[in-house]
Amino acid sequence: MEIKKKAVPMRQQPVVERIKNFNEVPLGYNEQEAIEEASRCLQCAKKPCVEGCPVHIDIPSFIKALRQKEFQKAIDIIHENDSLPCMTGRVCPQEEQCQAVCVMKKMGDPISIGRLERFLADWDLANRKKQKTAVLISVPKKNKKVAVVGSGPAGLTCAAELAKMGYEVTVFEGYHKLGGVLVYGIPEFRLPKAIVQAEIEKLAELGVNFVTNALIGRALTIEDLFKEGFQAIFIGAGAGLPNFMGIPGENLGGIYSANEFLTRVNLMQAYKFPEYDTPVKRGKFVAVIGGGNVAMDSARTALRLGAEHVYLIYRRSETEMPARQEEIERAKEEGIDFCLLTNPIRYLGNDSGMVRQVECIKMKLGEPDASGRRSPIPIAGSEFLLDVDEVIVAIGNTPNPIISRTTPGLKVKKKGEIEADENGQTSLAGVFAGGDVVTGAATVITAMGAGRKAAKAIDLYLNSKK
């Protein structure tokens, strides 16, 4: 049988419709499409895609089961290494990981591993009420308590793995809703909140306890958690402290961090104001600063809130954008105006203290540095003004220092990330950490991988204390 070189395309909302709603843009494969795409897999003996996956899912095996219509077997294979496939199938950058090393890439398109994973995860979600979790729930209990700080991808993965081992796990979340960056940072059109909630409900069925409105480092300290009987603690608090450029006028009204903007819209449903009482500025001429996924999310969200024109300002070229290519393409389709090799240098305000213009300067790429990357250099005399009434700064985040400042002996790096070894062990006995709080802002799947490794390390640590 001849192998098809081209991947099966995924249906999505038409541009003219999706820019007016917050519904999910890609619609996913149906059964026929999923089986057709799975049939392209060569079933390589060396399985390079498995090595390319941060959590080492047995990708050829689940694809083989899928194309044989053994959907339950396929999702069970995924669940052995990935507790949250509904999420990773949507937001994991497969094109840089498992699909980047797919052998099919040498002769055509790589296998659409993420789309197949999403199909199976959605199938599982639709059929979950018919399934039994008794096997997982009946795991012998170890009568040992573990606290997990943060309910983002690292925390949820660590909690799931520990619960399957029989530990009594309690997840502490600082916000009023669970999900961490999955809920407050990723828009509905990329990751529907109902899917995150369904995955959290699955963890609750495993016996995981959840406590919201509990900001560890303030309501309770790490020391307090030990005093309450927790024998090990995993910190997966993410990187929620936004970075700014420190340029003139940055304190004007109408200038948001992407963190605040997306939190208001995603978590607090400000897009439904006044139905929900959390307002957000609805700019007509919006500038988004940055070139990552958060910048794309912010720009596309501003458009859906009614912006007439959205500029995306990035100081490097498109090929150096850290955002996923498919998100860049969708942003372009939706009419986002890419201002590349451009950098803001100051903001100007009106008499009311609100931003009215951003002054930018054009950039050029210099000679490659030791890493091979070319640094952007300002072009003298190329300054120009853009009229804007809202600016969203999306140039990265660092961990909030509230935990490190209230935890004596917990070592941190220069930018505030918690020091931890490859298994998540920190400088304090019984305290582990993983995800963005250790690495700085990264991907959902790498955070999940860190949570999974830490769970194994916690198990070894607690077993050694018998």
Image: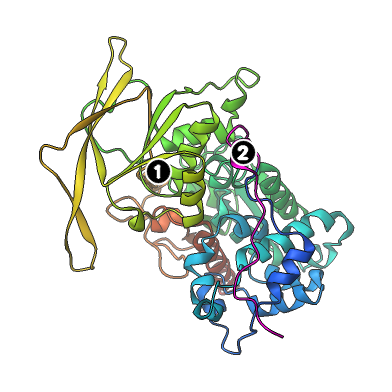
Q: Which mark is residue 400?
A: 1
Which residue lies most toward the top here?
351
Dot 1 or dot 2: first in sequence order is 2
Q: x, y (%) of residue 361? A: 20, 38
User: Which residue matches tag 2?
Assistant: 18
Direction from residue 166 to residue 89 in the image, left or right: left
Is residue 6 a member of the stretch shown in magenta?
Answer: yes
Q: x, y (%) of residue 314? A: 31, 45
Mark 1 belongs to which amino acid? Answer: Asn
Q: x, y (%) of residue 259? A: 44, 38
Residue found 58% across the figure and 27% down from its top: 271
Direction from residue 17 to residue 317 in the image, left or right: left
Q: Is residue 174 visible?
A: yes
Which is nearer the eye, 279 or 448? 279
Is residue 318 a member of the stretch shown in magenta?
Answer: no
Q: x, y (%) of residue 288? A: 38, 36
Q: Is residue 411 visible?
A: no
Q: Secondary structure at mark 1?
A: loop
